[in-house]
């Protein structure tokens, strides 16, 4: 639609589209409204709509993903995670915390440390997907309660993983952002379920997913009505043996070109080695990432999961200083709690 | 335990293990009983047990998978799919049918054709995992009903995919074997759910899963009490562009060496090209597969999903003749309905 | 050209093509002559040629490989390795021997054993490509002399690897077939050099080469005038850790469809584990391979290279019995020395 | 050896090592001398040497690469490319120019443009490795002469690829640094040949090479006596289809940890898309790369090879400004010709 198209004009376009047996999907942007349609449409329908008042143009979209595409929505989407903006021209959003929530003490100590260093979102797993059924699978609901308490203590927003549709309600009750992990990137029942609730979703790229498949999985969530999706590059599987995964840094600018959704980077899973986390985090920032997801643990050697890739408090604080310098070098700021604090005050 | 160990001796061993705070898991075999334990055990516990009457030996198992390991259970597991035996020295089990159940007519025509050619299990998707939310996602419950009706019509056993824990009951009510697809190989809530019901489970290797990860996912199902797991090699993702996936034929003998579970091959998804299905199916049989899972469609050009990899009725019948010849060459028979017919009569 | 086109007609067509500034390449087949052209051609040239006498049709070839393509040469190429035919309807050609030539005794013992079991070609490395500069790099010329002596002793044809253009003459003097290894598949100076001499070339697929790149490398050799190229699938690199490489069995039927050149399989490098060699060899035969390349060593545990993937004499003999059975099941014979013996007598 | 160990002490140690039948390799560092040995050594030899005067310690090196290892040589190697230092604390070295040398005019225009923007080394291919024999393979010796003339014109140092041992002399005569391309990373005859001449070598990682294999290939060159090796990450092959390769940014800090050799990044081949070159170049710098190798062309749309990944003069100049900012953010400078100019004056 043209800028300033009236409500009546928009309604008339939607009605005309419906007459062709096609479902119109309103896509409001900051400056103007777009109306999407999916599946096969006829030339006749396009012609009929193009001549209506208030219509700027009819654009055929060639990508298999639609709602996620920059061809459909050109402006950056900014996702609000309980007052922390992610994407667009927002400051870099740093999400940090332990791989697993192991105890209230461990979580509170970590939350305070990462907040002091400048993180604005606390991460921590309550439900853990583990390759083996015999390893620690997380504290479950107790973990969720610890996370909510840590938010109350520190003011940090909370992101945590949800593994199955049946847990979506419980996780959404306690967390500010629901993570869908790499192993579940194509768990469509789960994508549908997180798409039908309003909290933001952090969607991780699958272990061997293409960029297009990641965007199609985002499309599942968007198509259910939840437009608050953050994408996360976390490394793909290759033959290299020194690293756990190969962090695909080029996926960041590629995604920023293909989609309006925010894109963050997980250098912890992306490398699997604590000593590679800092350089890869800086690389991701230099390549244009909208945020970072970093594992931090009071005592990585004693972590119940993924200790080898976790940073100590000291290493995380040092990283944050470097991150701020690289972010400024490419014309971006790190939040360091300011935006959120202002939001909470307002 | 030694062969012929008494119930009392077995109970005594279990009790002694429990005194060390460890849970014993009885693993009955055709010839003798094994008792497994998991997690860390002490040398003291091993010594205490080894001296009890009826104990043959205490074997430390090094693999991260236990119940799935040949080190724990040396004899081949034979899974019964509604009277069709899969694994061990059973005849080759051929499972065939359309990618998606599209209509009653399409399904019945296909079921009769694959039965006539010698298949003993009917495959067909009622719930379809699709990369894009805008493509056909299956007929759902209606599809399950068509499958059950096709079983009544042809006597074929039925295998179909289940996508989420909430659907496990419905699928188990209509099907004889529940398929967990490649995208869900590490959907642990789903693995738990199919492990808690008694119908056999067909577990497909994930798109970039290692053989060890496949076995760990099987371990999830086994650990919940369901010992009827069939593994399926269906190709892994590589850089090759002519094929949809790269069928890993060496995974078949490798799995047969590492595990006692039956292993079948899916040359349709494994290649993505109908003209490669027959040679790869023969290769899988020559390499020792216990069965095949093949897509067959009355009119592949008009299939709603994966038509390009489906065989016509004629091509499938021709393949079955070749399969029988290669199977005989390595000392194995194809069922062609005989075993199941005998079972049903009995 | 039409069948029975005269020499004069063929010359006229070549001359007309040259008038357009294009080089004609005669491609004689068993039944008729084709004339290829490469690079960009004009519609005008095609029209001008199509109207000449003796011309059957002008076919635009879409593949980036030309001389290797079945679109250009429809009939199977049969390569003669010193009297052993490879490809087309020839019996399966089995090439076997040690990874490296270590000594005259080791080589002679192996040559006699593989001959007794039915192999017709002896393989063995004199120049070895090794990842590390500190490992055994082969006996060099002395190894070539042992190979030639073993041929005299057993009547087996000999294939061995050449690593660099400077060695092509020496290797061609002693061997009946020159192997270009996986690491050198895109060593274009070497491809040019083996293309400019007349001995057959065994070209192995690179570690992460696509099927199209393999055919383009074959095209280098063919374009230099040597039409005796045998392709070899030997596994590609993936993330799987149990195996050294992932043997791509579907590449065999795919190559047979795309090219007229013979295709053989190397299950030894293709898996890296002796216990997977036999099932993967049988799989390759079932999938339509024209031959096998198998590592055999008198004492694999003491081999100077790749012992873990070598078969003992006993295992190789057992494999040959199974190979013959599977070959017969798909309507193919194993040579067992007969063809070559007949050739040598003639 | 201890700091300040005398020549006599060093000689005594070498002599003692030789008495055990082992070859000692002196490895002089800035602060002290190390003496390496390769292959299996005995505990007795270690004990005998450890007690000699001037010996600091005997360190067993576990890596399969030795001369390339930081365990053997702890200090950064700084390679001089005709006066341009690469590695250690040197300024970032930017090497830029066209994929292929196409003409004197094209090369001179590009050389002047990249020099003006701050590059200190000119890259350009005279011998081009191409997948197809029918595409442009470079100007050969004429290209080398153009490169030498462009050096005279601009003062830039010159790096260009060498494809085969027979060309090493000609390339070394005209260029200041010899590039070994990804396809030839395991062309051992070529590695030997560049190792036996004194000009620096730029060694690119193979398309599917592991980091360890890259270091083993460097070891070949080092073992022949040429210690001036620069490593280059240029992307590995994965299943992703949007990009030509997947740039492995974590390889940069990983290599810096494992080896003392300089590490540079090629974001042009590493992505294959001009619009990804700048963000990936910045990522590489942020991750600690010692330099960049970037394709620049006066008119990328008309390039004879790889135009789609080349930058225009304007885009390259803009990139250099950003590179300088990111380099400074992590405490590093870009050269911009100063060091070399100073060297040439001296």
Image (cartoon, coloured by chain):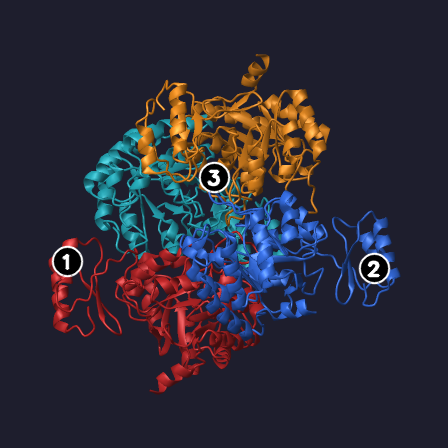
Chain colours: A cyan, B red, C blue, D orange
Residue linked to disc 1: B47
D267 sits left or right of B218 in the view:
right
**Tag 3 subunit:** D
Residue linked to disc 3: D216
**Tag 2 subunit:** C
How would you rate the neighbour count of disc 3 (Cα within 10 Å): few for under 14, some for 14-19, many for 20 or more? many
- Residue C180 appears anywhere in the view: no
**Tag 1 subunit:** B
C171 sits left or right of C318 in the view:
right
Q: Position of residue D109 (x, y in %)?
A: 68, 26
Q: Nearer the viewer, mark 2 or mark 1?
A: 1
Are both tags, 3 and 1, on one chain?
no
Q: Nearer the viewer, mark 3 or mark 2?
A: 3
Residue linked to disc 2: C50
Q: Secondary structure at mark 2?
A: helix
Quadrant showing the C terminus of chain D: top right
Q: Secondary structure at mark 1?
A: helix
């Amino acid at each position: 639609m043209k800028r300033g198209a009236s409500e009546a004009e928009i309604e008339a376009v939607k009605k005309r589209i419906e007459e062709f047996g096609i479902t119109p999907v309103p896509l409001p942007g900051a400056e103007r409204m777009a109306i999407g349609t999916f599946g096969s449409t006829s030339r006749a329908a396009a012609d009929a709509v193009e001549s209506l008042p208030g219509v700027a143009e009819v654009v055929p979209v060639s990508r298999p993903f639609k709602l996620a595409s920059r061809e459909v929505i050109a402006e950056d989407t900014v996702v609000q995670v309980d007052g922390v903006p992610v994407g667009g021209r927002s400051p870099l959003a740093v999400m940090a915390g332990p791989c697993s929530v192991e105890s209230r003490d461990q979580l509170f100590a970590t939350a305070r440390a990462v907040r002091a260093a400048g993180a604005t979102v606390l991460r921590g797993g309550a439900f853990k997907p583990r390759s083996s059924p015999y390893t620690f699978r997380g504290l479950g609901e107790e973990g969720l309660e610890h996370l909510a308490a840590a938010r109350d203590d520190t003011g940090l927003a909370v992101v945590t993983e949800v593994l199955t549709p049946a847990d979506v309600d419980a996780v959404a009750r306690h967390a500010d952002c629901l993570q869908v992990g790499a192993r579940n990137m194509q768990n469509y029942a789960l994508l549908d379920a997180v798409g039908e609730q309003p909290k933001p979703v952090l969607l991780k790229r699958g272990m061997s997913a293409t960029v297009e498949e990641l965007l199609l999985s985002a499309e599942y969530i968007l198509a259910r009505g939840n437009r608050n999706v953050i994408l996360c590059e976390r490394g793909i599987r290759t033959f290299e043996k020194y690293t756990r995964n190969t962090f695909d840094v080029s996926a960041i600018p590629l995604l920023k070109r293909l989609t309006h959704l925010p894109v963050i980077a997980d250098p912890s899973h992306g490398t699997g080695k604590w000593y590679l986390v800092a350089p890869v985090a800086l690389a991701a920032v230099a390549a244009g990432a909208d945020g970072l997801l970093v594992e931090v643990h009071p005592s990585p050697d004693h972590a119940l999961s993924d200790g080898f890739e976790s940073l100590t408090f000291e290493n995380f604080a040092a990283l944050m200083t470097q991150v701020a310098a690289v972010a400024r070098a490419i014309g971006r700021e790190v939040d360091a709690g300011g935006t959120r604090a202002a939001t909470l005050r307002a």
